[in-house]
Each structure stands twice: as structure tokens, then as C-alpha cells.
Image: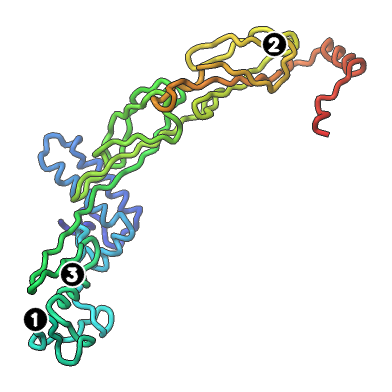
């Protein structure tokens, strides 16, 4: 593969933001979906993704700049590393000193050389790092060639915000992926906040395959419902006389309003459960929908009322009570 900096059209001194910007522009321009009549579009798109996998990741970029890996991410042979110091050639090896029979040693002892051909092979292979698995010396001087693990594709992550109604009813949402591609994502009914949807093969390609796209679901705040697991919660404003005398009040749910029977003498803060009016089940657990929990909030008139003031003074003087006695 060509030099990854050249593929992305950036200088070697470019910072991470410049590299990312260049990659996004090229991904959008060269995406196969946008070049359906160009048979080479997929090849060019794969090339820029492979280049970005090298220079778009800090550790790999440094390794490439140091010459430790090539443009495909494979390790380069660094040569013998001997006692002369890093980057210098190792000790001179006189192969005439070796006897390749079993148990033979070079003159001067094993500490200054190799006991047999396997030691030579081990030394050579010791200079190879990265993703290569070391060759294994066979008997009688043979060895297996090294096997390289091709880098797999990379997953991409996207957060998608949906409405509570979409989360409850399910549906399809158009999502723009970091690869530049747009896909239709099926959202199952009852999907909870933070859940992930995995799209196989929609990530970034690599020599060893293509990664996946991970879609994390976020639910936008609702004007009056709050999500509590599979349940929903709502504050229901009621008048003072509804709380004192009782009656029926209309309470909204996800699929239409219902009547809630309020008993006489209901205090503010009391919570009532409306079964089955929470989030639909998501196909897991017991399969039952959640519930709606309605909490009563007594609301006084916005404008003052003299009759109410007089009644409250009379109650205060003639029928006092202490609702906070348990706090003392």
C-alpha cells in the first residue's frame, strides 16, 4: 500500500485533527454508495480506511514514523540487536565456528554464541515483533515460516437520540455512520436508554475483515414523562378541592389519556400506579409492559382568593394540625 500520509493527502507533520478532517472528506467523496458507477471506488475507499487505521491511531502512527511497521501495519525486520547498543549492529558471526550437530557448541562456550542452528533461528526471530508469531525451529535445521495475523476491521460507534414515543413504539431511523455511509436502523419497541444495536459489517475495513457499527440509543427528555426502567413517572397537578373532595382526573399515557380515581383527602405527593401504561416490553424478561406511576401535586390558584384565605385562617385558628410532627 502507498504511504498513508500520501493516501490521505496530508503532511507528515499534520496533527490528529487535520488527519481526521482529511479522512472524513475523502470517505464522503469516495464512498462506494456515492460512486456506484465507478468499479474502483470500493478499492479506493478501502485504501483510505487502511491509511487512517495507521496514522489515525496515535500508537500505530508513532510505530510507523519510527519505521517499526509498514504501511499495512505489519512489523518490519529490525535486524540483530546485539550488545553494542540499540540501533547498532550485533556481534559479527562467523558461521564456520558452528557445528550443527546435536549437542555441539562453538569455541568459547555457549555464553558467547549459539549452541546450534535453532539458536540462530531464535535470535533472528527475536528481532521480529508486532503481530507476527515466531517461527518454530524444527529438527535437523528446518523451521516453519512465520505466520502473520492480518489486522481485522475496526468497529465504529455512534450515539443516536430518539424521542420517547419512538423508543416505545419502535420504528426506523436514518443514521449517518463515521464511515460516511447512511443506513436505516430498525429500533425495536421498548428499547431502553443506553442499549446498543450492532450492525454487522458496517464498520471500517481492514485486511482481516470489516468491523461493525455500534449504535448507542439515547432518549430525549419528555415534557412530562420520565423513564424509570420499564416504568414511566408523571406529576399530575390537581386542585385543592379535588384533593380534599376526591374525584376523577385525566392522566396522559403513551397511548391516550385515562381517568384516575382520586380518593377524598388525597395529600400532595401521593403516588398512584396505573398498570401496563409504562414502556412496552422489549422482548426480554417476563414480556410484560411497565407501569405508569402518577404522583399528585396540589396546585393553588394563580390569583389570590379572599374566601380561601378566610377559610384557611379559620382552619388555622379552630382546627390546627401538624403534618411535620414526625420530623421533630
Residue 193 location, quadrant: top left
Secondary structure found at label 3? loop
Mark 3 / mark 1, whichever is N-terminal = 3
Disc nearest the viewer among 3 and 1 = 1
Does any portion of residue 150 appear in the rendered image? yes
- Residue 240 is situated, as x and y percent measured from the top left of the image, at 74, 14
Residue 112 lies, with reference to residue 33, above or below; the image says below
The residue that mark 2 highlights is 263
What label sits on residue 11 in the rendered view? none
The residue that mark 3 highlights is 77
Mark 2 / mark 1, whichever is N-terminal = 1
Crowd rating for badge 1 (residues with CA inside 10 Å; few <14, some 14–19, many 20+): some
Contact check, label 3 and label 2, Cβ < 8 Å: no
The residue that mark 1 highlights is 100
Mark 2–mark 1 Cα distance, whole angstroms, equals 99 Å
Q: Is residue 42 left or right of residue 175?
A: left
Amino acid at each position: 500500500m502507498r504511504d498513508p500520509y500520501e493516501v490521505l493527502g496530508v503532511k507528515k507533520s499534520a496533527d490528529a485533527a487535520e488527519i481526521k478532517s482529511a479522512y472524513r472528506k475523502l470517505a464522503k467523496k469516495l464512498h462506494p454508495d456515492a460512486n456506484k458507477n465507478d468499479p474502483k471506488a470500493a478499492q479506493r475507499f478501502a485504501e483510505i480506511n487502511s491509511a487512517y487505521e495507521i496514522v489515525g491511531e496515535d500508537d500505530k502512527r508513532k510505530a510507523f514514523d519510527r519505521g517499526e511497521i509498514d504501511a499495512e501495519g505489519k512489523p518490519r525486520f529490525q535486524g540483530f540487536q546485539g550488545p553494542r547498543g540499540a540501533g547498532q549492529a550485533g556481534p559479527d558471526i562467523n558461521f564456520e565456528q558452528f557445528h550443527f550437530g546435536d549437542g555441539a557448541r562453538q569455541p568459547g562456550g555457549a555464553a558467547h554464541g549459539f549452541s546450534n542452528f535453532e539458536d540462530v533461528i531464535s535470535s533472528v526471530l527475536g528481532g521480529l515483533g508486532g503481530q507476527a508469531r515466531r517461527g518454530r525451529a524444527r529438527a535437523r535445521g528446518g523451521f516453519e515460516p512465520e505466520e502473520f495475523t492480518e489486522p481485522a476491521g475496526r468497529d465504529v460507534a455512534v450515539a443516536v437520540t430518539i424521542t420517547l414515543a419512538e423508543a416505545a413504539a419502535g420504528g426506523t431511523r436514518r443514521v449517518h455512520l463515521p464511515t460516511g455511509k447512511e443506513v436505516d436502523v430498525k429500533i425495536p419497541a421498548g428499547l431502553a436508554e443506553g442499549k446498543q444495536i450492532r450492525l454487522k459489517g458496517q464498520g471500517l475495513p481492514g485486511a482481516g475483515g470489516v468491523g461493525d457499527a455500534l449504535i448507542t440509543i439515547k432518549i430525549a427528555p419528555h415534557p412530562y414523562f420520565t423513564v424509570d426502567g420499564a416504568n414511566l413517572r408523571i406529576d399530575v397537578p390537581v386542585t385543592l378541592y379535588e384533593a380534599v373532595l376526591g374525584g376523577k382526573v385525566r392522566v396522559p399515557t403513551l397511548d391516550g389519556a385515562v381517568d384516575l380515581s382520586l380518593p377524598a383527602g388525597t395529600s400532595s405527593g401521593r403516588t398512584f400506579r396505573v398498570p401496563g401504561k409504562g414502556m412496552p416490553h422489549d422482548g426480554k424478561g417476563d414480556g410484560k409492559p411497565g407501569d405508569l406511576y402518577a404522583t399528585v401535586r396540589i396546585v393553588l390558584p394563580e390569583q389570590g382568593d379572599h374566601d380561601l384565605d378566610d377559610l384557611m385562617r379559620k382552619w388555622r385558628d379552630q382546627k390546627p394540625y401538624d403534618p411535620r410532627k414526625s420530623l421533630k
